[in-house]
Image (cartoon, grey):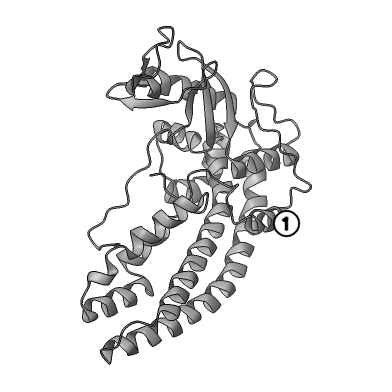
């Protein structure tokens, strides 16, 4: 159940399974001030050559890696002026669809509430429809947030003071991030980080939507070439088009599972986990409590907002 007292937790620096030793393909887990082989913690790995990786050292390496991906001076504003209209168009299109879904959710919710007020059992089909429509609303919210990630990724890759000063009225108002936060935001775009046994970053694989954003930046800024060795980025997907709306349609057709590996739509398990988080324990509530909860999920309340942000944050 989503509760008013629930707090939206800050995501970890690296998602589960992101850090991986390149040779053994063993993933790493955080253990105090170090990252260690997850298989060793289970007693299944005897490779002594895989070192404990100091967390602060790895975070510094991540920061140096981000610097290699910074955009050329003067190009941030060019991309900003291209991305803002895309965001506005998406919000307008998404708003129309959300209104339709919201009306369906309210209508279905009212049927359930009417039964509860009459002391009847909730109609299973109505409850299934309520959950289905709510899930569609969360997907629409998530797809709108994705377009905003273009702007977020742009902010992460800007170093130029001239670009920053021209955009500070926008960025510093909405994204007042310090350098270490920028490194954190950069890590959110990495599906896999492959390490040597000593903890050096050997290769990366970007998240699906981040790979699109990276290609979008390169198309619009031809001189943008990250300062990494050839083959450092392992992504191979080629997009038929870099039109944001056409690419979004392709992502949506595949149920958004190829956007970010840690979203609530990536797997059947993650979908179930999200619905369990929202509706787990609902049956144990009194009728009045059920009515109150259904109303909260259909309005701008802490419960509804928490349910929405559960779709995009790492667990």
Q: Which residue is mark 1?
A: 246
Q: Is residue 224 left or right of residue 261?
A: right
Quarter occupied by residue 15: top left
Q: Nearer the viewer, residue 235 or 74?
A: 235
Quarter occupied by residue 274: bottom left
Q: Secondary structure at mark 1?
A: helix
Q: Nearer the viewer, residue 9 or 166?
A: 9
Q: Nearer the viewer, residue 309 or 197?
A: 197
Neighbour tally class for label 1: few under 14, some 14-19, many 20 plus, Cα within 10 Å: few
Image coordinates for residue 218, horizontal then vertical, percent? 71, 36
Residue visible at 48% across and 38% down in the picture:
188
**Compared to 270, does 101 lie above or below?**
below
Residue visible at 64% across and 64% down in the picture:
89
Image coordinates for residue 293, horizontal then vertical, percent? 29, 73
> Where is the C terminus found, in terms of image quarters?
top left
Q: Is residue 241 left or right of residue 33?
A: right
Quarter occupied by residue 42: top left
Image coordinates for residue 239, horizontal then vertical, percent? 75, 44
In this view, the residue farthest toward the front is 44
Q: Nearer the viewer, residue 261 or 246?
A: 261
**Compared to 311, does 53 lie above or below?**
above
In this view, the residue farthest toward the top is 49
Visible in this render: residue 291? yes
């Amino acid at each position: 159940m989503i509760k008013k007292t629930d707090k939206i937790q800050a995501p970890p620096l690296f998602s589960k399974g992101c850090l991986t030793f390149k040779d053994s393909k063993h993933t790493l887990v955080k253990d105090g001030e170090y990252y260690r082989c997850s298989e060793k913690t289970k007693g299944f790995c005897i490779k002594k050559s895989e070192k404990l990786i100091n967390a602060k050292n790895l975070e510094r390496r991540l920061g140096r890696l981000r610097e290699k991906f910074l955009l050329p001076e003067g190009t941030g504003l060019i991309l900003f002026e291209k991305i803002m209209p895309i965001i506005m168009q998406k919000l307008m299109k998404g708003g129309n669809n959300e209104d339709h879904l919201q009306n369906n959710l309210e209508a279905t919710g009212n049927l359930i509430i009417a039964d509860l007020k009459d002391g009847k059992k909730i109609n299973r089909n109505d409850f299934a429809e309520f959950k289905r429509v709510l899930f569609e609303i969360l997907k629409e919210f998530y797809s709108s947030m994705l377009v905003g990630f273009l702007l977020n990724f742009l902010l992460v890759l800007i170093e130029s003071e001239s670009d920053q000063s021209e955009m500070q009225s926008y960025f510093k108002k909405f994204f007042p991030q310090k350098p270490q936060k920028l490194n954190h935001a950069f890590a959110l775009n990495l599906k896999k980080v492959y390490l040597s046994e000593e903890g050096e970053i050997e290769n990366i694989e970007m998240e699906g939507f981040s790979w699109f954003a990276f290609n979008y930046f390169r198309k619009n800024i031809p001189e943008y070439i990250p300062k990494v060795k050839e083959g450092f980025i392992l992504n191979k997907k080629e997009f038929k088009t870099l039109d944001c709306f056409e690419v979004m349609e392709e992502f949506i057709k595949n149920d958004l599972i190829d956007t970010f590996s840690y979203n609530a739509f990536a797997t059947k398990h993650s979908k179930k986990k999200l619905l369990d988080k929202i509706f787990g324990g609902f049956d144990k509530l009194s009728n009045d409590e059920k009515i109150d909860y259904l109303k909260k999920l259909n309005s701008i309340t802490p419960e509804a907002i928490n349910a929405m942000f559960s779709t995009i944050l790492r667990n």
